[in-house]
Amino acid sequence: MAEEEHQIDFEGGEAGASLTFPTQCSALRKNGHVVIKGRPCKIVEMSTSKTGKHGHAKVNIVAIDIFTGRKYEDVSPSTHNMEVPVVKRDDYQLVHIDDGFLSLMTSDGSTKDDVRIPEGEIGQQIEEGFEEGKDLIISVVSAMGDEIPLSVREAPSSS
């Protein structure tokens, strides 16, 4: 019976890369990233309050969600850990637009078809540039399983 309890399936595992890592609050900095209420955010304001008679110094954090732009605030003791998201930024070349999704070419030549066209100004720039036949480079930011195009620029001409 003890053998059955320890049966572990190694076949369908992930690479083991974490979506976040812990960092002490006092080590966080403005323009850095932090997870607040389960969302990856960029820190826009930080302040530290003094310790009380028996307490810890508190860190007040104001941050903006990197995907939705929503503002979050959090207060935490400076000695406690907070999660920091692993934020990755990649550039891709736009190949095609299909049903609201971008078809992007990676640096190794394979295609990536699971990035949705963002709403708002960047989405309009992408659609207009594609319709005009421009070669576009899309910067995609990914964190905690979400991806969104954050900027678009015209590819340098090779003439």
Image (spheres, grey):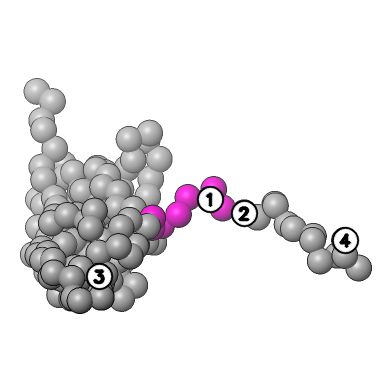
Report the disc number at residue 3. Answer: 4
Count of number-bearing discs = 4
Q: Position of residue 138 (x, y in %)?
A: 20, 48
Q: Earlier in the sequence, mark 1 or mark 4?
A: 4
Tell me the quarter of the picture where residue 75 sits: bottom left
Q: Position of residue 155 (x, y in %)?
A: 13, 38
Instruction: Name the residue tied to disc 3.
Output: 56
Instruction: Name the residue tied to disc 2.
Output: 13
* Above or below for 37 versus 11: below
* Above or below for 133 versus 119: above
Q: Amino acid at mark 4?
A: Glu
The secondary structure making up most of the magenta span is loop
- In the image, which residues are magenta? 13-21
Residue 80 visible: yes
Report the disc number at residue 7. Answer: none
Q: Earlier in the sequence, mark 3 or mark 1?
A: 1
Question: Residue at left 53%, top 50%?
Answer: 16
37 and 133: which one is in front?
37
